[in-house]
Amino acid sequence: MKRISWEEYTNLRVSDRIPYLSKPNTDNEPFHVLYSQQFTREMLDHLCALADKIRALHKTERGGDLLRSTLRNKNALNLFAQPSTRTFMSFLMAEQKLGMEVVDIRDVSTSSQAKGESLQNSIRTFSSYVDAIIMRHPDAGAAELAAYEMNMADRRIPVLNGGSGRDQHPTQALLDIYTLTKSLGEIDGKKIAMVGDLLRGRTVRSLSYLMKNYEDVELYYVAPERLRMADDVKDFLKRSHIRYTESENLEAVVSIVDAVYMTRIQWEWDRAAGAKSPDAGEYDPRFVFRKEYLDRMKKRSCLLHPLPKINEIDPELDYSDDPRVVYWRQERNGMWARAALLARIFDVDRTIMDSDDD
């Protein structure tokens, strides 16, 4: 791989960075996973099928043993410098189901970064002991800097972005695709609403980028004016010929779409900026999914949420047996989708796919 400076690398468009994130001598097969744009339709379909296979194998003792044998000689570091429950647990369980040994760092104040060590040097140190780094960090570009450092190192190991600043959350988008596919049968031709804090929500950014892989999809962005989807994503959709509509009327949209993807208003960004106005608070009734909205949705549709949620979905729906309420199932799907991704990165996916379920 040609080595370039960090400045040269960061001046590249995302599409031109992808070869530097890929396995050598492949058609841009992901090695590091930083962006949703790295995934093709073929990859997504394969990962969904692989997640199904892992899920089926896990149900039997023989299958579980086989899964745990696939990566039993590999070690993973979960480096989570930002609070996380679902992503951390999901990756941890995915790693364990494939037999990986796992260590975690959830407080960088216990590492040498507290002494002033650079992120790059910390990553180089960690890579001496493990075979993959899953990274969540409050700073935009942190996971990318870690991947760049690994590209410059003699021992290159994969870095997976578990959420970096306001950038992207590609593995969340992967599990969202898996959930949408399981719920709707297919994504081609579907209408999907994304609701809430679209400006600062990295999950909706990542999911929007993945829509390039599907035909005749239409997006409905439902958000307060100040929290509308960023222009860079909308420019991408225009270039990709993906239709989208912006609205502040959730009630009018729920009967039109096949999926409603709710997100919370990320009030912590407002508080950090010192905002005290009511508009900067956690609650905006216009963007709450009410119980009666479920009655207006199509018979085959789904209600998703990346979690955590605060008050943007009627709490009664947490206990609904309606199959369209899938956000708890969506959370569990993350374990299978991330296990599938790890299996693919370490080239054990064919071993899994070719095995017997019973």
Image (cartoon, rainbow, N blue to C red):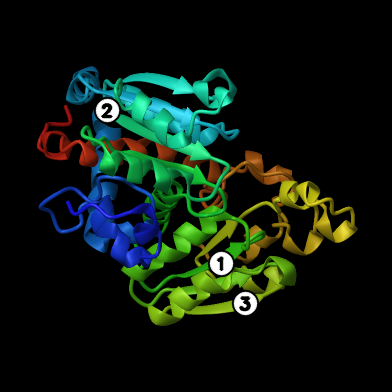
Marks 1/3: CA distance?
A: 10 Å
Q: Position of residue 11 (x, y in %)?
A: 40, 65
Q: Which mark is residue 246?
A: 3
Q: Where is 56 relative to 45, above or below?
A: above
At a point 84% along the width and 61% down the height, the residue shown is 279
- Mark 1: which secondary structure? strand
- The 10 Å Cα crowd at callout 3, few under 14, some 14 to 19, many 20 or more, is some
Q: Which mark is residue 131?
A: 2
Which kind of residue does numbered mark 1 sit on?
A: Ala
Question: Is 278 in front, or is 289?
Answer: 278
- Mark 3: which secondary structure? strand
Apparent side of residue 93 relative to residue 275 in the rendered image (left or right): left
Q: Position of residue 215 (x, y in %)?
A: 33, 74
Q: Is residue 241 visible?
A: no
**Residue receiving disc 1:** 193
- CB contact under 8 Å: marks 1 and 3: no
Which kind of residue does numbered mark 3 sit on?
A: Glu
- Mark 2: which secondary structure? loop
Q: Position of residue 355 (x, y in %)?
A: 11, 32
Q: Where is 156 relative to 274, above or below?
A: above
Apparent side of residue 76 relative to residue 275 in the rendered image (left or right): left
At a point 26% along the width and 37% down the height, the residue shown is 153
Q: Which mark sits nearer the N-terminus, 1 or 2? A: 2
At a point 23% along the width and 21% down the height, the residue shown is 68
Q: Nearer the viewer, mark 1 or mark 2?
A: 2
